[in-house]
Amino acid sequence: MSLAASLTQASPVRRSRSGLISLWAVQIALAGMFLLAGSPKLLGDPAMVALFDAIGIGQWFRYATGLIEVISALALLVPSFAVFGALALVATMVGAVAVHLFIVGGSAALPAILLVASAVVVWARRHQLLAHFRGSAGELNRSRG
């Protein structure tokens, strides 16, 4: 099988028991971290309010970020939604790393670690994304026909 074919396969990936347990351990740890990170944003923790004041976009961005983190954390715990939650967290953590590096300063290590862990989940569940988009394209083509 070619590399391109292996990257775009739509059939479910066979994982060893230890691989599946490891993937779920990462997903559960990420869910816990993002529930703990998103909740203070939604509850108006003074430190979060100050952080988002420093970012300068407005407090609506704090609520949006908190919602993305909490909803994505919950999605990580549902097998059929986990890849979508992880994908949203990858985008969120790219932004968090950029904010730490260029706006508020401080260490970007934790957002970078969470970015890598979220990317691992997306990669491990990529077959679900491919199957979803292939299914959507098939539905679109059928509705036109």
Image (spheres, rainbow, N blue to C red):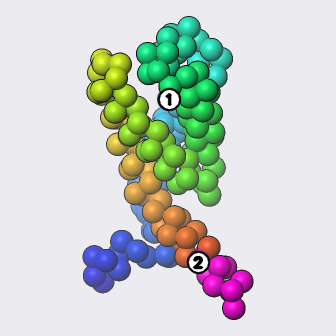
**87 lies above or below 95:** below
Look at label 2 and name its amino acid.
Ala
Q: Earlier in the sequence, mark 2 or mark 1?
A: 1
Residue 32 occupies which quadrant of the picture? top right
Relative to 48, say whether 95 is above or below.
below
Callout 2–callout 1 Cβ contact below 8 Å: no
Q: Amino acid at mark 1?
A: Met
Residue 93: image location, x then y, percent: 42, 37
Residue located at (47% from left, 21% from top): 56
| Secondary structure state at the residue bearing disc 1 | helix
Of residues 135 and 81, the one nearer the viewer is: 135
At which x and y percent is residue 105? Answer: 30, 19
Of 60 and 38, the residue lying toward us: 60
Q: Nearer the viewer, mark 2 or mark 1?
A: 2
How far apart marks 2 and 1 lie (CA) works out to 34 Å
Q: Is residue 53 above or below residue 17?
A: above
Q: Quadrant of the N terminus?
A: bottom left
The magenta segment is 137-145
The answer to whether residue 80 is left or right of residue 6 is right
Q: Does residue 127 appear to the left or right of 80 in the view shown?
A: left
The answer to whether 114 is drawn above or below residue 86 in the figure is: above
Q: Is residue 84 magenta?
A: no
In this figure, what is the number of numbered marks? 2
Of the numbered discs in the image, which one, if any, rests on residue 33? 1
Disc 2 designates what residue? 137
Secondary structure of the magenta portion, mostly?
A: helix
Q: Which residue is at a point 71% across and 83% down the rendered structure image? A: 143
